[in-house]
Amino acid sequence: MIDHIFGTLERKAPGLAVVEARGVGFSVQIPWSTYDALPEAGSAVKLHTHLHLREDGLALYGFATPAERETFLLLMGVSGVGPRLALSLLSQLSVERLHRAIANEDVVLLATAPGIGKKTAQRIAFELRGKLPAEAQAVGAEPQVPADGPVFTDATEALAALGYTRNEARAALRAVLFRGAEAASAEALVKEALREL
């Protein structure tokens, strides 16, 4: 099992990243969420990975956060959901929204991912509802602060100024929002995120 890869990002494209580590170039399949979080080519990058055995060979899947990888593996445990559909879901919905949709049995939202029909969405909601992390089980409403709004952006920049990478900052901030913490300002959000970090 290859738990993670740390190296230089040689190139990136939607769905794919090539990471050079100790002279070896690893071709890693990624969801859109991970693609969006990648730095520029030539930068150092760390991807949390899953090595998948297929009939025609091996495939390496990479994720910006351990939560993305964990969700990918949970999705693949659902009958009829393979790596392609799991990546499709993670490309369409953030981990937080995906967990929320499963916890709330929001079949309509799950079915917005390409390749996911109503029956598959129902099966995902049914089979995974009790397997989500504890904090996801009681999630109801959307977080008070959107993960793409100015407060979130300001909080990300503040954490980056403190020396954290933007990926680390975003992951911590999303965890805070996912818990439903009261964080109406960037300052309050940063304080909560520092506890996560």
Image: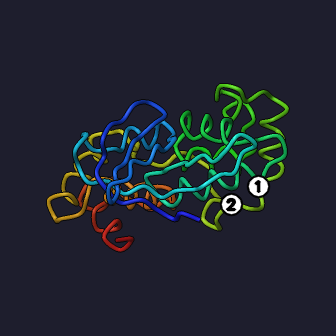
Residue 98 x %, y % = 61, 45
Quadrant where the C terminus sits is bottom left
Residue drawn where x is 36% and y is 39% of the image: 148
Q: Is residue 185 visible?
A: no
Residue 49 x %, y % = 52, 56
Circle 1 is placed at which residue position? Answer: 129
In the rendered view, would you say 14 is above or below 129? above
* In this picture, residue 88 sits left or right of residue 20: right
Residue 172, quarter of the rendered image: bottom left
Residue drawn where x is 39% and y is 42% of the image: 18
Residue 46 x %, y % = 37, 57
The circle drawn on residue 183 is none
Quadrant where the N terminus sits is bottom right
- Residue 130 vs residue 191, the one in the foreground: 130
Q: Amino acid at mark 1?
A: Arg
- Residue 169 vs residue 62, the one in the foreground: 62
The circle drawn on residue 132 is 2
Residue drawn where x is 77% and y is 36% of the image: 121
Q: Is residue 133 visible?
A: yes
Q: Amino acid at mark 2?
A: Leu
**Is label 2 in a helix, a strand or a loop?**
loop
- Residue 97 vs residue 181, the one in the foreground: 97
- Asked whether the beta carbons under mark 1 and mark 2 sit within 8 Å of each other, the answer is yes
Q: Residue furthest left?
A: 161
Residue 22 x %, y % = 32, 60
